[in-house]
Image: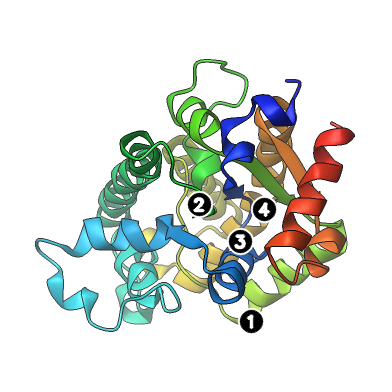
């Protein structure tokens, strides 16, 4: 993919879709531009929660906001022993599918906003860290990536291996629910049970989530690298640390486009 700045509508109208692992700064940067430069911020994670909670789980909307997505994590839950706070694996799969469907809709809705208001500008689409589980970056007709790239400049946030270790350490200290691609999840669950010789209702939910996260972070890094190569640009962690306002971000993007 060759990016030409003056041919990219997302760049022209300053509409950027941030992609990358959770914890790399997508929301942090978006909120900086909201507070400093009055940009618009569309949080896919927040929109997922609104879609999931609007009917049967309206009580989970209480206190749910962009800065506090805890209820979304609690809704997904963790598979394992119910005496340790887990849920049945079958129920976990159902909730994972609900999350998948909501994430697809919420992500595509960002593009719909632009298509209904094509002059929309200074707009940050803060995608979910699990978007990489929903797309095939090798397919030039991938629905989600095609829709995003038509309306936004796709920016993948990357970090050195040491930063990914920080993410792992954070997760070890406080495991939280995650979304997994279904086939990958089934294989992880089976491997964990084989490795630990555990039956389902004896599995410590946090132990499984830690096991899964370590596998997930390696998998996702590779997918995001391919998305960056085929569909957008990448900004590294050191560049992100220097971003204090919209002008800083735009300069970093211009540099990344020149070397693409």
**Could you tell whether 145 is left or right of 99 in the image?**
right
- Up the image or down, 126 lies above or below 145; here it is below
Crowd rating for badge 2 (residues with CA inside 10 Å; few <14, some 14–19, many 20+): many
What residue does disc 3 label? 26
Residue beneath disc 4: 217
- Please give the residue where the numbered disc 1 appears in the rendered image: 173
Distance between the Cα atoms at labels 4 and 2? 17 Å
The secondary structure type at the circle numbered 1 is helix
Number of the front mark, 4 or 2: 2
Tag 1 or tag 4, which sits nearer the N-term? 1
Label 2–label 3 contact, CB within 8 A: yes
For numbered disc 3, what is the local secondary structure?
Answer: helix
Earlier residue among tags 2 and 3: 3
Residue 239, image quadrant: bottom right
Mark number for residue 127?
2
Q: Residue 39 placed where, x, y %?
A: 52, 63
């Amino acid at each position: 993919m060759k990016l030409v700045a003056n041919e990219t509508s997302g760049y022209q109208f300053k509409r950027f879709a941030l992609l990358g692992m959770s914890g790399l700064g997508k929301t942090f940067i978006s909120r900086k531009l909201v507070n400093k430069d009055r940009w618009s911020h569309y949080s896919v994670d927040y929109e997922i929660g609104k879609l999931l909670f609007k009917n049967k789980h309206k009580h989970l909307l209480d206190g749910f906001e962009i800065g506090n997505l805890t209820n979304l994590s609690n809704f997904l839950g963790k598979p394992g022993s119910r005496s340790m706070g887990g849920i049945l694996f079958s129920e976990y799969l159902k909730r994972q599918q609900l999350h998948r469907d909501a994430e697809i809709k919420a992500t595509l809705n960002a593009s719909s906003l632009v298509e209904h208001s094509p002059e929309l500008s200074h707009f940050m689409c803060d995608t979910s860290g699990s978007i990489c589980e929903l797309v095939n970056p090798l397919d030039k007709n991938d629905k989600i990536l095609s829709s995003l790239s038509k309306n936004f400049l796709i920016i993948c946030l990357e970090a050195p291996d040491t930063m990914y270790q920080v993410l792992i350490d954070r997760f070890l200290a406080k495991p939280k629910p995650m979304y997994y691609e279904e086939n990958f999840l089934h294989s992880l669950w089976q491997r964990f049970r084989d490795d630990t010789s555990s039956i389902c209702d004896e599995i410590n939910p946090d132990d499984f989530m830690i096991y899964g996260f370590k596998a997930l972070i390696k998998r996702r890094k590779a997918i995001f690298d391919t998305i960056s190569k085929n569909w957008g640009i990448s900004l590294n962690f050191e560049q992100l640390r220097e971003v204090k306002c919209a002008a800083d971000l735009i300069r970093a993007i211009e540099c990344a486009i020149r070397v693409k």
